[in-house]
Image (spheres, grey):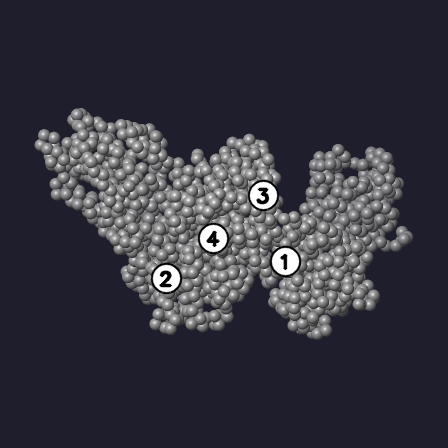
Amino acid sequence: MTTETKRTLPVTDLSLVVLIGATGSGKSTFARKHFKPTEVISSDYCRGLVCDDENDQGASRDAFDVLHYIAGKRLAAGRLTVVDATSVQADARRQLVQLAREHDVLPIAIVLDMPEQVCAERNAARPDRAGLPRAVIQRHRRDLRRSLRGLEREGFRKVHVLRSVEEAESAEVVLEKRFNDLTHLTGPFDIVGDIHGCSSELETLLAKLGYEDGVHPEGRTAVFVGDLVDRGPDSPGVLRRVMGMVTSGNALCVPGNHENKLGRHLKGAKVQQTHGLAETIEQLSHEPQEFVEEVREFIRGLVSHYVLDGGKLVVCHAGLPEKYHGRTSGRVRSHALYGETTGETDEFGLPVRYPWAEDYRGKAVVVYGHTPVPNTAWINNTICLDTGAVFGGRMTALRWPERELVDVPAEKVWYEPVKPLVTEVPGGHDGRPLDLADVHGRRVVETRHLGNVGVREENAAAALEVMSRFAVDPRLVPYLPPTMAPTATSREDGYLEHPAEAFDQYRKDGITQVVCEEKHMGSRATVLLCRDADAARERFGVDGPTGSVYTRTGRPFFHDPEVTEEVLARLRAAVTGAGLWEELGTDWLLFDGELLPWSLKSGGLLRNQYAAVGAASRAVFPGALAALEAAAARGADTGALLERQRGRAADAAAFTEAYRRYCWTTDGLDGVRFAPFQLLAVAGRSLAAVPHDEQLAWLDRLVAADDPGTPGGTGLLRGTGRIVVDTGDEDSVRAGTEWWLELTAAGGEGMVVKPLQAYARDGKGRLVQPGIKVRGREYLRIIYGPEYTRPDQLERLRDRFLGHKRSLALREYALGLEALDRLAAEEPLWRVHEPVFAVLALESEPVDPRL
Amino acid sequence: MLNRMFLTITTTGTAENPATDLGFLLHKHPDRVRVENQSHGTAHVFYPEATAERCTAALLLEVDPVALVRRGKGKGRGGAPDAALAQYVNDRPYAASSLLAVALSGVFRTALKGQCVLRPELPDQARPLRVEIPVLPARGGAAMVHRLFDPLGWDLVQAEAVPLDEQFPEWGDSRYVRLVLEGELRLADALRQLYVLLPVLDDAKHYWIAPDEVDKLLRAGEGWLAAHPEHALISSRYLARHKRLTQEAVERLELVRLAESDGSEVEELDNAVDETRDTQERPVPLAVQRRDAILAALRAAGAQRVLDLGCGQGQLVQALLGDPAYTEIVGMDVSVRALTIAARRLRLERMGERQRSRVTLLQGSLAYTDKRLTGYDAAVLSEVIEHLDLERLPALEYAVFGSARPRTVLVTTPNVEYNVRWETLPAGHVRHGDHRFEWTREEFRAWAGQVAERFGYAVAYVPVGDDDPEVGPPTQMAVFTQEAVSDTTTGATTDAAATTTDSPKEGEAA
């Protein structure tokens, strides 16, 4: 190397560059010339920061703390960082190498090995260093000389040494991309999951994806997530195909742990030939030596993970947390190949894998394999494509950017798994059972319709108790209904609630068409109905029940499972009769509805709270009135008091009448009615946004099919009266009001007004209330007390606060929608359970219970 | 809600000793209607009849329920930070008798003291009295009324149950009775008895608390309470109200709301702590035997770090704390209320630092796996599994044996065969209202056997309590011991374990 040669210094675009040189060797000048001022952190500057004197060596310790801190922050943010300090001592460099490793970037050394004379002259020219003893420069140079040969060993991945002023001045820094940075490639891609020597399935899958002999006519690129080899029947065949496609530029490939182990074997390392490696070695022994060498080189050249498509897509074998994307370290490679374990072992003696995807919040989609799962599912922008082809499952590919899944079934079970793909553990069906961390403590649930919804710790605690001790198996509770806000308070004489305000509110929200639905006075019931026990097993992982009937806190309606099954059987017959299984293409349905009579579920409450009030009134009034009348007859002035007591006696009688309407005697299922008012979801689809007229049309057909007059009809189902109102049309509004008056005069509880479109937003794009209840005048006696209609009481009751109830209703609605979306997308149980649990928790928030 | 309370007091007399003296005694003129405003409503006193032969005074208390609720009004959520509590209290047949008692003591203040300025001789005379209360909340029903009033010298004590609703005879009787008392007593004595016994009979949860309850009780009980055979019951019910109420206010609200949203009574959900049983002072012998058996098994297993899963009110935790061999004790329960009581019982707040560092109480649930529970020597599930619905047992099995995986697991549960030996237990009944099932010895062993098999444990069975030759012991215990696990760190067993042995090559970008 001569001094005339112009040096180019390759520097990885994300790295920690350490300048090394004696005082006066020109590090700062070099840094200024080649890097942005903000990229360079100098120890002198940091000394100044902590003690106002850039040359105070006594402040070095604090100054370096600051330097390391700033450098750490920059590296964490993914920014190239240059450290301008002498760094001539091994100990100082060790700390920097460590810092680089902590942030998974490469440490790079640029050494300015200048003659002593040059350094001395430069220092002499600087007033603040003019007095620096020559011995300091000599000591620095001594330390530097001693260090030079060991820099690679210290961990620097590139070492550039500049030995003269000319070399330093002519050198040029060239930024290089990281090997894993393929952000410029935009695909489209077909990402293929674990193969494990199943070459026949691979060929079938590639053909299904449209590849012809490893080439896609539309120029798509295949991306293999690794684990090409081991266990299966033809690892060499798979390697030949994949290597050919990679070489010809039709595919990319990241290594799996099985390639890594095979590579070590091929390099001559001693590895245990377990987990199907022996099969691969045996298969390769029939291959020509050149092929085996090609395999060795192929594996050696594999890059741990790729960042693709402008940073929107990350592909690796075992999944990768966001902080490792595009990073380069042994730790990143290890994580990309093996994933992270918790250190525990499960009941099969297998290490428990850390559920990194559950913590993932990154914007980039991470596609990976490694962990065989029965079903693929998106979890927080990540997806695992290992569907256990070699264990008799399927081989799966993901089309990007289309996000379509394409799979082919395994031709046979090529290899028996140590641990069953689907465990008998509740929730294991979906990958893992429910974990307390999914629900416990203060939590935030991300919803797509209302952003983040928070849950307070004390509310989660109460929900945990109810969910654990009383609820139906969470697998059969995929939804809980939201609470509903009442209409704004009416000023109408004698009324606390009246339809006018409800219509008004929707008109203001820009909703023209609303449907008024009769409000059934029973108990809210959610019904999950599967076509048969097999469907329930297949979809919900339960063995035995064919569905569930549960209350708004997830408790079973009937203590006897046989009664539940009987209700389900009747509903099932109606669905079959109405032909809805086929029409909706599903083998399960989720209903929202009301189970009647009220006395069925709330008998205790009725007896101890409502009937008791009635009983007490009936027992007290005759005597009290008689006494007052007798006193009046004696000439005592009881006028107003007597009048008031008479009125109150009448109110008490009306109260008793009010609750009696919703009570009747049942015997087994005789007298029990179910009034469904919404079909929430079916296989693969949330129906929460289906307009209510379509909804009611389906439900009408069910009710008709269950009519006792038709063959097989049981009379369990009850229809829902309704009227559609145009909020902008006075006549229509009047008709709606009349309808409500008639309904409530005949003893009805009231009505619920809903946007006809079901899912609606207002002019400003905000979610509107999914329903507003308008309760009848008589019914409200049960809520507000027998005498609430007295003008003085009514006036005081009008002063009620709806804001919190409305907000609660919207938050619970958004959580319910989220649960349905996750259910429809076949997300794992814990993902569906999370918003369901949150609804239950919110129900324990303080709010006026009369609303 | 019961917002009308009504009581009449009748006396009879003659021309010489006219019944209308009642007016002097009560300090209320028989020809007037007396109206007195009180904090929760208005009390009216009037006389439906007033002759020398017969005089009746009536007390009508009008409670204003809306005013009661609005008292809680504030700026908080829903307009009132405590709206739910105020509502909850108001929505129930609250403290009917307490309010009536307050009214009595207010309106008939001097009569209660036995004073009469105009006719000082009257209060000391016994008179024929008839007291009638058409609606009186009575916990314990007519029988309790008799227990309380029979010893007090009345000739007639009559308590008739008031039916809940004639239209639904199957609902049975309400908690109210119609009370009639007849006898020759001094009026002041009768009033004092009512003042104390009406709230005692009600025994309801209510919010009205006077600061000097004990003094009041002693004053009003003067001359009759000390000799009353039920004085212990009377005092405890009378005074317990205060304590219970304040606890409810802080501990129950979330569950109250969940019950409300479900149209259920709060007792249906909030029953983790059994208040009817005396768990504090005199643990029943079986509980002691159970604890001893558990401690013996833990000692035999050499456990130091122990989980008490479903620790309830912390009795076992307390016992474990007494033995320094246990270096780390974790009590877990799903009920926050139980944990609060446990913390109070253990005096966690006042415990020395060293002791305190040995014990942790945490809320958790065995329906979920829980990383906090891994790595312990032993776990105890004492009388826990039977509180779970059978179909939810597999989740518990996995959470304990599959996920937490302590070396030793102790499970105790009732032996249902023994139930025939409990004299007080009706045939076919479980021992506790919340027991979802009770197993025979065979059923328990079948369950424990398959759990052990599935999760790699060995299991042994220990009888707890008197081991009856025919029906076995009252409590059965299974001791699960984890079988030696293969050493996964060698990478010999699994793929993923290879992480530790196959160190991957360093980063590749260079």
Q: Secondary structure at mark 1?
A: loop
Q: Position of residue A453 (x, y in %)?
A: 51, 52
Query: From the viewer's perspective, is residue A809 above or below residue A150?
Result: below
Q: What label does residue A419 carry, if any?
A: 1
Pointer 4 residue: B389
Q: Chain of mark 1?
A: A
Residue B273 located left or right of residue A446:
left
Q: Which quadrant is the C terminus of chain B positioned in?
A: bottom right
Q: Tell me the tag on residue A669.
A: 2
The residue lying toward the viewer, choosing from B244 and A323, is: B244
Which chain is home to disc 2? A
In primary-sequence order, the first of circles 2 and 1 is 1
Residue position marked by numbered label 3 in the rendering: B378
The residue carrying pointer 1 sits among few (fewer than 14), some (14 to 19) or many (20 or more) residues within 10 Å by Cα, namely few
Instruction: Kindly indicate whether the residue at mark 3 contacts the one at mark 4 (C-beta within 8 angstroms).
Output: no
Density class for disc 2 (Cα within 10 Å; few <14, some 14-19, many ≥20) is: few
Q: Is residue B372 visible?
A: no
Mark 4–mark 2 distance (CA, rounded to whole Å) = 23 Å
Tell me the distance, in whole angstroms, between the alpha carbons under discs 2 and 3: 47 Å
Which amino acid type corresponds to the residue marked 4 in the rendered image? Asp
The amino acid type, in three-letter code, at marker 3 is Ala
Kindly indicate whether the residue at mark 2 contacts the one at mark 4 (C-beta within 8 angstroms). no
What residue is shown at x 38% (from left), y 39% (from top)? Answer: B245
Residue B344 in sight here: yes
Mark 1: which amino acid?
Lys
Answer few, some or many: residues within 10 Å of disc 4's Cα (few below 14, many 20 plus, some between 14 and 19): some
Query: Would you call the spot at circle 3 few (<14 residues within 10 Å), some (14-19), or many (20 or more)?
Result: many
Seen from this angle, which residue lies furthest left?
A: B15
The reply to whether callout 2 and callout 3 are in contact (CB within 8 Å) is no
Q: Are discs 1 and 3 located on one and the same chain?
A: no
Q: In what element is the residue under mark 4?
A: loop
